Amino acid sequence: MRNFLVGGITLIMSGLFLGCAPKKEASISDVASKVYVAPGSHDEFYVFFSGGFGGHVTVYGIPSGRILKVIKVFQQDPETGWGYSEETKPMLMTSLGFIPWDDTHHPWLSQTNGEHDGRWLFINANNVPRIARIDLRTFETTEIIEIPNSGGNHPSPYGTENTEYVVAGTRFSVPIPQRDVPVESFKENFKGTISFIKANEPGKMDVAFQILMPGFNYDLARCGRGPSHGWCFFTSYNTEQAHTLLEVNASQNDKDYIAAINWKRAEECVAQGKYKEIPATYYHNYYDEEKHMAISEVKKSVKMIDPKECPGVAYFLPTPKSPHGVDVSDDGEYIVGGGKLAAVIPIFSFSKMLKAIEQKAFEKEIDGIPVLKYDAVLNCEVEKPCLGPLHTEFDGKGYAYTSCFVSSEIVKYEYKTCKVVDRAPAYYSIGHLLVMGGDTRKPYGKYMIAMNKITKDRQLPVGPELLQSAQLYDISGDKIRLLSEFYTLGEPHYAQGILASKIKDNVAKIYPLEKNKHPFAVKSEKEARVERKGNVVHVYMSAIRSHFTPDNIEGVRVGDTVYFHVTNLEQDWDIPHGFAIMGAENAEILIMPGQTKTLKWVPKAPGVYPFYCTDFCSALHQEMQGYIRVSPAGSNVPLKYYTGLPSPQAQK
Ligand code: K7E
Ligand code: CUA
């Protein structure tokens, strides 16, 4: 009903401006021209969507809504061999073993002085706690760090305004350290942690310190900017500390908390030795772009700060009711809590918070963390905003936009006065929303995107499951205006948008062959060869339009393990070669120009097996193929290999 009314108003409004032109058509072409990007021209923004339970990140051009790339992160991908190739397997190693899946929720673009710098995108893994770095030169995942002492990493990575840190928090409190205890002993044994991970040097991500928190559920996070730089804010729910039937038992308290963490104070405490180095096993995996290979290192301990020993490191802001999102305004002064069961949207004032801390306006203390008085930190409450407020972004003009899941709409209001000025429906059940640059000091504004959980009747039906939708709105005027709708992969919880001009000129087109330090690389066809080491056969193979060298291999036996190390000798943009072999139980590999990738193959039975290029690379792509002969175990067929003229032995 509400949706219908709002739609009706939009139609009348556009009719007013368009005079006597046929209302519907004029309005459509007007709207369509705003999202039309002519073939061959580029979009103004890159937008990075998380893949949710797909474990990936997708890249779209906005305003067109064209998909540009799927970035493989916490997953195995048969198309490229990510997580299947020998080089990338270490990227998915954790203290719990090889974990080839995760649940990505929040992409976060690196910042300098609170603005996008176009260097990296970070993304969290919600299931086995991890954070990944994606290099925006190659649009590839280059680093993954595991977060110890955590049971699920949801409030993450949401970094600081110079990318000093990305953050993590325990969605599910767990026994810390992990041990075998009854679940009923939750209140006594279960704890939360908030982690700060050094992020400003590629290849050097490290858990700088963790803060021991009460056993609540930590849900979302945002770090301060400008005046509030040095602080990060985390929502918590289940302050009841329930461990069963949370939908009832964790909805008892009228207010839960936003935790305000002073990370500069934490740095002081670390410098003064006010922490405990505690044992913790976790992996740090790094993709070396010159070796074209990932390396895992295992870390063994972490610095844990107990707020009781480091006063001033943490405070709680009472927040109605089971808050989900917490977001900091572009000017760094206002902190918006999205109480999903609350009747209001509370907006806190950072300067009031500092004053309240100074005046010790505390109502109580929990585990050494003072709870500030609600009235002492509140700026204002947005009254009757909508049902189920979740997430908020800012347009740089003094307005905030909050997504509301239950009433399926976006509400726009002045965040200084809490006055609602507009609202727009979302089809249907919006989760996060995104304003271009809406979490920076200088939002670009212009466009907003709703990420909707439920699609129902909006598209052609494709069976019981439908893709989730994104809706693009124009927010350049007073009124929010729906422009278009497109469909997304996995479950994009959140997205980040950046001006394309901040990235596109730095994007790599090839990997320089002369810098390739892969131990099994070949720099020319002359170096291509096959070597046997016991039962292991290494094929040093090259690929260039339109053949492999070698393309005929004999002398492999059942019982051998064969590694195809394929180097793509091309130095030309957008010319990958693929490599697939019959019977491979893992994947194909897609090798970028100048790169080396390795596929493991274990032949099961004697025979002659074809291999071929999977990526249409030239007019003679279908000719890009070869054979490997497999003889019975114990056979004495000699090892030989060639491309073109067979060797003299082979001609016999
Ligand atoms: Cu609201 Cu995981 Cu940020 Cu989903 S989360 S919507
Ligand atoms: Cu190489 Cu097709």
Image (spheres, rainbow, N blue to C red):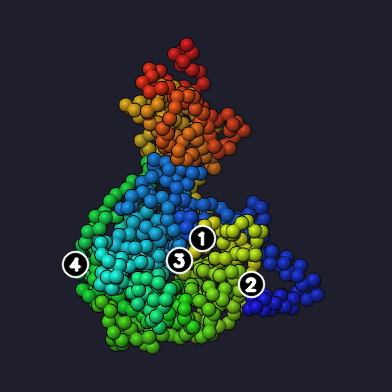
3D distance between C-alphas at marks 3 and 4: 33 Å
Numbered disc 4: secondary structure: loop
Quadrant placement of the N terminus: bottom right
Q: Amino acid at mark 2?
A: Arg
Q: Position of residue 114 (x, y in %)?
A: 43, 68
Please determine whether, in this image, residue 437 is positioned above or below residue 514: below
Q: Residue at x 41, y 50 (%)?
A: 100
Numbered disc 3: secondary structure: strand
The mark found on residue 115 in the picture is 3
Please determine whether, in this image, residue 412 is positioned above or below residue 196: below
Label 4 CA crowd tier, 10 Å (few <14, some 14–19, many 20+): few
Q: Residue at x 33, y 59 (%)?
A: 147
Which residue is labeled 2 in the image?
481
Q: Position of residue 389 (x, y in %)?
A: 50, 76
Q: Where on the picture, by quarter, is residue 126?
A: bottom left
Q: Residue at x 25, y 77 (%)?
A: 368
Q: Position of residue 158 (x, y in %)?
A: 41, 66
Q: Is mark 4 in CB contact (under 8 Å) with mark 1?
A: no
Numbered disc 1: secondary structure: loop
Of tags 3 and 1, the one toward the viewer is: 1
3D distance between C-alphas at marks 4 and 1: 43 Å
Q: Amino acid at mark 3?
A: Glu
Q: Where on the picture, by quarter, is residue 226?
A: bottom left
Of tags 3 and 2, the one toward the viewer is: 2
3D distance between C-alphas at marks 3 and 2: 26 Å
Classify mark 4 as within 8 Å of ligand 1 or not, answering yes or no: no
Q: Residue at x 37, y 74 (%)?
A: 238
Which residue is labeled 4 in the image?
273
Of tags 1 and 2, the one toward the viewer is: 1
Q: Position of residue 484 (x, y in %)?
A: 64, 64
The mark found on residue 491 in the picture is 1
Classify mark 1 as within 8 Å of ligand 1 or not, answering yes or no: yes
